Image (cartoon, rainbow, N blue to C red):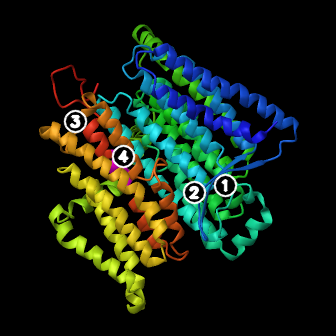
Amino acid sequence: MNINYFILSFVLIPLFAFVITMFTKEQQEKKISNITIYTIGTVFFTLTGFIAYWIFSGSNNLNIREILLYQSKEYTFLIDFYFDRVTAVYLFVGSFISFLIVRYSSYYMHLEKGYKRFFATILFFFFSYNFTVLAGNFETLFIGWEMIGISSFLLIAFYRERYLPVRNAVKVFSIYRIGDIGILLAMWASHHLWHENITFQKLHNYDLVHEHLLSHSFEGLFIAICLLIAAAAKSAQFPFSSWMPRAMEGPTPSSAIFYGSLSIHFGVFLLIRTMPFWEQQMAARVLIGFIGLLTAITGYFTARVQPTIKTQIAYASVSQIGLMFIEIALGLELLALIHFVGNAFLRTYQLLVSPSVVAYLIREQFYYFKPHKEKNSSALGKKFYYGWYLLSLKEFNLDTFMGKYIFTPFKRIGNKLNFLTPNNILIIFLPLYGIGIILRLLEEHIPNWLHNSLPTLFASIALMMVMKGFSERRYPKLAWMLLILQHFWIALAVSHNEHFQISETIWYLSGVIVAGVSGYIALYILKKNEPSYFTLFRYYGHSYEYPRLGGIFLLCSLGLMGFPITTTFIGEDLIFSHIHKDQYFLAFLLSSCFVIEGIALIRVYARLFLGNHAKVYHETPLQSS
């Protein structure tokens, strides 16, 4: 019995089924649902047998090195899989709940316009989920982490002809990307701390971890805080909690599988997986517990006053995950796993029966409603009660906080960069880029102070272009061009920082060029066909008439942001491997470029191809119900 083949099958079977589903006709509902049900069912029953065999064989942790994607003298990019009890629990719960959901969805989604798209996205999510849970190092985990973010966006925006689902999908994806800064910086700092791509199996070596943290305590705390940021964003913990109810715009089955049971618990998974590293740092444990406590309190009171059943369930789940953070901070890993299983099954059940519960409660209120009696209390007590009630009703203003202090500054900075026009790029920035290349060739003859400041200068120019691309509303092609050019400035910045080899530059920029040129051609075709509906001021819903063009542009956007379909996603890791361990500001600049670029690309795609169709020769839904 070859264990490697079994573990690999948990990833490859869903991927193979996803590809088959994409080539199945939309009208073949029975075939589409059967492919999905039998695929996930096969994985579930195979996994159950494998776990039983693994337990009786001694439950030894398994580390499997699968594919070497890139290797140089200083850097190795390896797809690595790891199986332990955390993996077993998450895989079992994920496959069982997914099996129930797709069985339920085969009837629930009957005759829906996007039936095929829904099941294809579910299969893609299931593949991403298994890939992430089985990840044996940070690079492998980050690939799955990104794929889960994209599948979340697609399912929230499932009703893509409506305004609110698309708007909320962009908002959720944006917060996911903000959390990705934590993963990127943790990967960078971890590479310098260990001088290798450390596997999660090696993190269980107490002596190895303790020795490194004794001499690098600051780096260790920095990595732990970055991991906490990523986990908090993924699990809707304070102050990122406001995205959770917005994610409920998708179909009820997708809400159950994503935000009731599986995807929402990935922050817990990340903390448990990296627990052998940060558990020796008391400051990290206090921060994790404090974030969990804040979320548990705010989530509980917010859930109590929500007007809709799905948002009540959402905030109740967020509150429970806050308690899991506290359990993890206290070192109660097994209790957190049990809590995860119970919460996942309970929220799945609640979300699936929520439509029936709503109908029942409406009848109950209609026939048996009784107003609450006013309680006698002091004036001060009433003020506190009503103030706390309003604060909970406003969700503790967390959504306003995120918009005011994170996204609005991005827009303001971008709006002040209106001098970034096509003419100025050709007149100013193209010669400046040429000067940068010349300085790179003559680096031995320039003073050290200038040589040391050039990487930060060029990275700042890259971030400036990303900010403008993020805020641009009038010219989609200009936004796209700026987002392409920022990759070239990043490559130049790193070339001045360390000897970035020509082969590494080609590896990084080849994916950028292919995705960028293809996306620009798609924009050119769209503008030629729809000159009156080609800005970014509103959502135009062009996927109604150009679904294939929209799909191609989405793939180009994913390729440009470093999604694992082009060489760019390996190139981004190569970039960070050439940033020195003391260059925190440069690492922050480059990670900000990649993160904000992803948000900008999804915004361009959503505003052009999703939302209410701009033309009114057919029925269009209202913006709000």
Q: Nearer the viewer, residue 59 or 358?
A: 59
Judge whether residue 314 can be spotted in this image.
yes
**Callouts 1 and 2 close, C-beta under 8 Å:** yes
Determine which residue is flagged by label 1: 274
Q: Residue at x 40, y 73 (%)?
A: 493
Q: Amino acid at mark 1?
A: Thr
Circles 3, 1 touching at the beta carbon (< 8 Å): no
Residue assigned mark 4: 556
> Considering depth in this image, is 491 or 347 the residue closer to the camera?
491
Marks 3/2: CA distance? 37 Å
Amino acid beneath label 4: Cys
Q: Which residue is mark 3?
A: 540
Tell me where residue 341 appears, x and y as whole percent: 67, 33
**Would residue 597 be counted in the magenta stretch?**
yes
Q: Nearer the viewer, residue 62 or 96?
A: 62
Q: What's the residue type where badge 2 is placed?
A: Leu
Q: Residue at x 29, y 29 (%)?
A: 162
Depth check, front residue: 287 or 609? 609
Circles 4 and 3 in contact, beta carbons < 8 Å: no
Badge 4 element: helix
